[in-house]
Image (cartoon, helix red, strand yellow):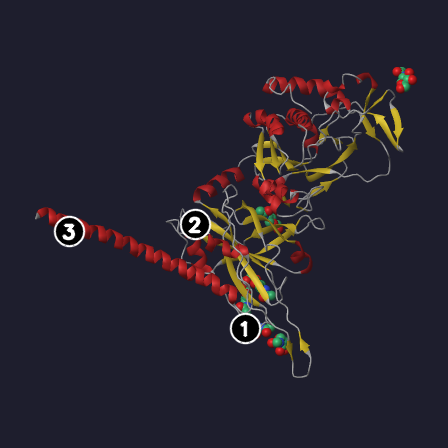
Amino acid sequence: MSTEKEKEKERKMFVGVVWNCAAELKYLLTALLFLCSLVTILQFLPTRFSLSASDLRPCLSSPTAPTTVTATATTATVSLSEDRNNTTNATTTATAPAAADAPTDVILLPQPAPPAMEKDQVLENGIIKRAFNPFGSAAYNFILMSAYRGGPNTFAVMGLASKPLHVFGKPSYQCQWVPFGGSGAEENVENQEPIVTDGQKILTDWGYGRVYTVVVVNCTFSAPVIGGGSGGGKLLLHAATNGGGDTNFNLTDTIEALTESGEDLKNFNQVYSAKPKYDYLYCGSSLFGNLSPQRVREWLAYHIRLFGGKSHFVMHDAGGVHPGVMEVLRPWMEKGYVTLHDIREQERFDGYYHNQFLVVNDCLHRHRYMAKWMFFFDVDEFLFVPKKSTLKTVMDSFSEYTQFTIEQMPMSNKLCLAEDAGKSYRKWGFEKLVYKDVKRGIRRDRKYVVQPRNVFATGVHMSQNTVGKTTHKTEGRIMYFHYHGTIADRREPCRRSVNTTDITIDGIPYSLDTSMRIVAGFVKRFELKMIGSVLQRTRQ
Ligand SMILES: *[C@@H]1O[C@H](CO)[C@@H](O)[C@H](O)[C@H]1NC(C)=O
Ligand SMILES: *[C@@H]1O[C@H](CO)[C@@H](O)[C@H](O)[C@H]1NC(C)=O
Ligand SMILES: *[C@@H]1O[C@H](CO)[C@@H](O)[C@H](O)[C@H]1NC(C)=O
Ligand SMILES: *[C@@H]1O[C@H](CO)[C@@H](O)[C@H](O)[C@H]1NC(C)=O
Ligand SMILES: *[C@@H]1O[C@H](CO)[C@@H](O)[C@H](O)[C@H]1NC(C)=O
Ligand SMILES: *[C@@H]1O[C@H](CO)[C@@H](O)[C@H](O)[C@H]1NC(C)=O
């Protein structure tokens, strides 16, 4: 009897549990259905401003990112006009990785169903009105890489944007600061004016971009922006096409560029008000191709010795850091001299030279208050200060300048000294390649150094967004030796032995210059002292 009752109870409980689950399931399914129908409806809107793939992403990733879904569903306000001839504001919200270090998931998107077609029509007056049916979207409006605070009221946002949109349209950016309440929640914005400012767009690679161009958006508010209570806040970037791409629409993507906790702000203020941690910081360009581990090894040992203990090197791996290169980076990473960023993902977006303008701007703003001086040059280039001075005395002599540029010494990548013949494989690249191209009247690239606190964006050969003075009169005080074509050559570079101080080959006059050769011994001993003999067997 009692067992019967218990069984009955158990059965009821079981049913109850199932029913409760079902209720939750129903709720979930309803929510999903709602979202999917929203997505579907958006696709069929007559104006076929069917949201681009990026806009749909938050919806489709719902199982892993439920918060994203809610945010999107509540903030996506879509205002559309039946009138195809009208430029209407349309707002879609895209979520982006909040912090620079946050990993991002790649989500495969199904092909959306094609929207209803416009047909050609014969008008009353016999004229045939032709229809134009757009499909898809070939380049993103904005691809966020990072955003950093640069002061009490200012931020920089780094990203890529469709290049034709910038060349032929007038996209604009608006920045909004949303303080969190004391509990860390978003403050009730209805009661107060939104904190907004026009973003100043800086196009740093003007003329160089490809499908994408690099955009640095400077968001400077009229007053300091901080978190509500102890809660921090977030920076939104509203990226508007203003009718570029389709004059009927002012598509505006809202991007969560930065989320800042109270702790983040405290950390920033500490760095901001302190003396720079490093004297010299190197921001490297994108590393790609089949790099020679030996050449990279030589570059590191040489420059770490030159820059000294208060220096740091930021390298960007765009596919060039293969296991052999990793081996020569690792000892210096372990010593704290080198940080490696894996930027291979940017390869999806066709920009100039593996998006080097993007990563150097990221590097600038990421480390802006950590370094007194920032250097921008490549790993086949070697900085040099003549013997009568040191790097410190030279840098100090330029302290009144925000920026100075450095003259190039182009070196032959195949002429070596006859006396090295037979043993050149044991010598370092800058030790054996001693012939300098001395052809006159050629404009050569320069490289540059900045005091980053006064710089808002940077290019590759110099920065044009600075306050303060720039000088190019640095000849004889600092220079760089350029071993073009040696860094991605996995063979012994010496091809021809020369036993004279001057020689002309193919109309180019070369002259012996042993400035670099004579420091090789010191650099080798420095490497040995710092990291031991782990790299002795490095290959070309
Ligand atoms: C387009 O806009 C112009 C001016 O705003 C108006 O005169 C014209 O009738 C509109 N065309 C259509 C098809 O609505
Ligand atoms: C576009 O449509 C809006 C709302 O329908 C209207 O207020 C506005 O005047 C229109 N603008 C143009 C240029 O036709
Ligand atoms: C479009 O947005 C701008 C700025 O937010 C606003 O001033 C304008 O009135 C909006 N236009 C329409 C048609 O909603
Ligand atoms: C933005 O530009 C202003 C000058 O126009 C500058 O003072 C500020 O430091 C810049 N902010 C950043 C983050 O670069
Ligand atoms: C497009 O929208 C943005 C932001 O919503 C606004 O600032 C801009 O003025 C609008 N442009 C036009 C042409 O309406
Ligand atoms: C330099 O090389 C040339 C031919 O390669 C040779 O004839 C000459 O004797 C050499 N001179 C010296 C000083 O080694």
Badge 3 is on which residue?
Answer: 8
Q: Quadrant of residue 475?
A: top right
Quadrant in the picture for residue 115: bottom right
At mark 2, the secondary structure is loop
Q: Residue at x 44, y 41 (%)?
A: 263
Judge the density around disc 1: few (<14), some (14-19), many (≥20) Cα neighbours within 10 Å: few
Q: Amino acid type of disc 2? A: Ala
Q: Is residue 225 above or below residue 192?
A: above
The residue indicated by pointer 2 is: 65
Res 309 visible: no
Is disc 3 placed on a helix, strand or loop? helix
Q: Is 152 in front, or is 367?
A: 367
Say if disc 3 is inside 8 Å of ligand 5: no
Please tell me whether residue 430 is drawn above or below residue 225 in the rendered image. above
For ligand 2, the image quadrant comes to bottom right
Q: Residue tagged by mark 1?
A: 82
Where residue 30 appears, as percent x and y from the top left, is 37, 60
Picture residue at 41% right of the left edge, 52% below the top: 67
